[in-house]
Amino acid sequence: MTEETEVINVEGLAKMLGRTEASIREGIRRGVDWLPKSFKMGSRHCWLKEDVRFFLRDFRDGERQKPKPGRKRQPPPSLRGVA
């Protein structure tokens, strides 16, 4: 009988996100925005499964997308005034 835990570590997060453990560790080191917020238990980084699911739902629904930098595009000029 395997008991499901609500707290996951780097290995579990890598499986949930479909990434390697090395990319998760590098993301933690760099502070990337594609990782959910973690907490530390001792020396290990941990996540709550429900937090990860919520984070993934936000990504799916487009809630986590940052606005693109730069000016808004203007409509292109039309040829109506050309005679």
Image (tube, rainbow, N blue to C red):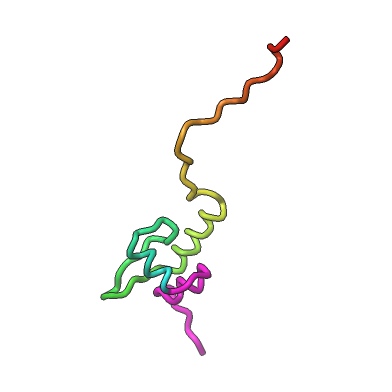
Q: Residue at x 63, y 21 (%)?
A: 77
Q: Position of residue 67 (x, y in %)?
A: 47, 41
Residue located farthest toward the top when viewing the structure as drawn: 83
Can residue 21 be seen? yes
Q: Nearer the viewer, residue 72 or 2?
A: 72
Give the answer, above or below, for where 65 lies relative to 7: above
Residue depicted at 48% across the width and 41% down the height? 68
* Residue at (47% x, 31% y) in the render: 71
Residue at (37% x, 70% y) in the render? 25
From the viewer's perspective, is 67 left or right of 44?
right
Outermost residue, left direction?
42
* Residue 6 magenta-highlighted: yes
Work out whether 8 lies above or below 35. below
**Residue farthest along the front direction in this orientation:** 83
The image quadrant that residue 83 belongs to is top right
Q: Is residue 41 magenta?
A: no
Q: 57 or 69: which is nearer to us?
A: 69
Report the span colored magenta: 1-21
